[in-house]
Amino acid sequence: MNILLLQNMSIILITAVIVLLIFNKLKLPTMIGLFITGIVLGHVVNDTSIISTLSELGVIFLLFIIGLEFSAEKFTAIKHYALIGGILQVIITTILVTLLGFALNLSWNSALFLGFLVAFSSTAIVMKVMQQRHITHSVQGRVTLGILIFQDIAVIIVILLTPILGGESVETHLLPQLIVKALGLGLIIFAGAKWFIPLALRDAARTKNRDLFLLLTLFICMGTTFATSLIGIGPELGAFIAGLLISNTEYSHQTLGYIQPFQDVFMSLFFISIGLMVNLHLFLSNIGIIILLTLIIVIINFTATFITGMALKLPTKISVSIAILLSQIGEFSFVLAKEGMSYGLMTNEFFSIFLGVSILTMSLTPFLEKATPQIVKLIGKISYFQVDDELKTLPEELEEETKIEGHVILVGLGRNGKHIAKACRQFRIPIRIVDMNPTIVENQQALGLPIIYGRASNESVLKELNITSAQCIVISASTYEETMKTIDVARRLNPDIHIIVRTRYLKSIDDVIEAGADEVIPKEFETSIMMFTRIMDYYNKDVDEITGAVNDLRSNNYDAFRTVTSEDITTYLNYKYTDLEIDSLRVSENAHIDDFPFEENNLKVTGVVRGEDTFIDVKSDFKFFEDDLILFIGHRENINKFFDTI
């Protein structure tokens, strides 16, 4: 391996860690720390090509995620605000900044290009701020997202127009060939969205192989991006289309969880790469004009977006919030700026100034968002906006979404899960379900059950289930490792949630409770209780007596059974409630009931536990499999004889 590459990557990572630790201590936005990391590295690392390459992947993953999170249903509900709002915001901003460009003695094409650059906001920063403030599903959050999506699509159009602004002639003779390629790509995308991708994802999901599913997802992202690039369309639009292809399937939430870590890492490198491009000497020598231009750009963006909000007849408060969120220059403007430089639309000096202004506008966004209430009050002092805000009512499609609250999240829809879901629906308890079996998810969605595909240990999946407002989560079907991960994520996202876990073995109780569970129900013991209640009923015991006995057994998280094995789980029952005793036997290899001397010792087999299934009717032809747990009853002396003979 190239030692220089390892050396450079080590320097990059340790510098980023040190800077971010300092910024975390000072409680400053991480993004500013990443910019400064890039500026510092620009004077330390000679070969920064690896950062530039990885940062481009960050942009691709960002647009892929935007496509994944895009919901046609939600977009349709606010399409008027997204389309009209997006068009107004981009046009007004472009016109105002173009006029500013003329004031700076730029040529018409350079001034117009600068207007386009400033018109596009930062999707990464805005989405992160909205998630941190929990306003993604609010009115301003939905309208802002709609405008951002329009901007992302508009970026592609501007990238196609950039050569023309730079003086390149349009080769009309290639137009028919381009149209044919575009139509062919459209047909392939339609077929993929309709048949190939849903089927491929379903088959990959059925294998329950995480690596296979992840690799298929990456192929869809990279393959679509490559296909669009072949016909001259930028990789950004290709990545967005790839996300759209998956967004309409039930696998979008799980895919988002897999891709999110990649996107976070690459976007961090993207912000570092922006810092790398800053010429510190030019930045410091032009600091005065950079600060002045930053203030002018923020005011222009705020004004253009605020006018857009008022034109859409949104309340003043919401218009101000949207205007602040979209007041910065976005990451795609850097991609555009590089294109513009290659066509002579920007000089190196002006590019450095533009970078400085962009970084400052991005860095101001978190601080301005925190000051939103004060800015609203300031604008509210103007009588026109006061009256306007009081009189306006929101259209029905923009009414605040009623988020589900106090609901139960059910992890796994096996036999026990179905019983819990049925009980919740019967007693009108709101419930949301997640399962890793795509067939179950498809079937239950068709029946109207609120279920999604995914791993509950995945943060994105739990957020989709509104974990922050849930009252209880029941983990009834999962491996031990997944259970522990799910408990950790659920407790971190909602410290007050009540966590109930159904574990496989009694010995796991302490570990699961220590991990953060409130209640743990061992499957083997619950089966024994069920068998015990049937025996008690057989002996005509009173219902209240049975209930009291069961409650006694379940008290204190099964403390009476913490140190015993699965074969001893009925010991506590044996001497207290009946003259017969219950015992169990673990099967070591496949066998028949006749292979064990039950009848010879006057013992009665009452049930068999196999995985998550319990068999009550055990006849003479019943076959036992390895690891089955046989439950049986009889007198102690006969049970002892039985164990002596096997």
Image (cartoon, rainbow, N blue to C red):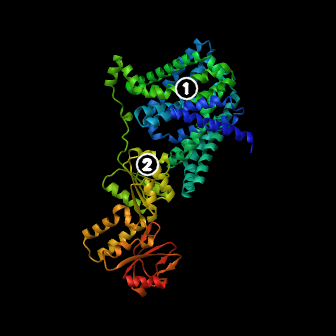
Give coordinates of residue 603: x percent, y percent.
39, 83
Q: Which residue bears the numbered disc 1?
A: 329
Residue type at mark 2: give it.
Arg
Name the disc covering residue 491, or none: 2
Q: Give the answer, above or below, for where 339 lies relative to 493.
A: above
Label 1 crowd (10 A; few <14 / some 14-19 / many >=20): many
Q: Is residue 113 left or right of residue 577?
A: right
Local secondary structure at mark 2: helix
Viewer-side residue, 52 vs 173: 52
User: Relative to 479, is 352 on the left or the right?
Assistant: right
**Which of the two discs, 2 and 1, sits closer to the camera?**
2
Label 2 CA crowd tier, 10 Å (few <14, some 14–19, many 20+): some
Q: Is residue 626 above or below residue 218?
A: below
Per the model, the C-alpha gap separating discs 2 and 1 is 36 Å
Q: Nearer the viewer, residue 449 or 338?
A: 338
Q: In x, y percent, where is residue 145?
A: 48, 33
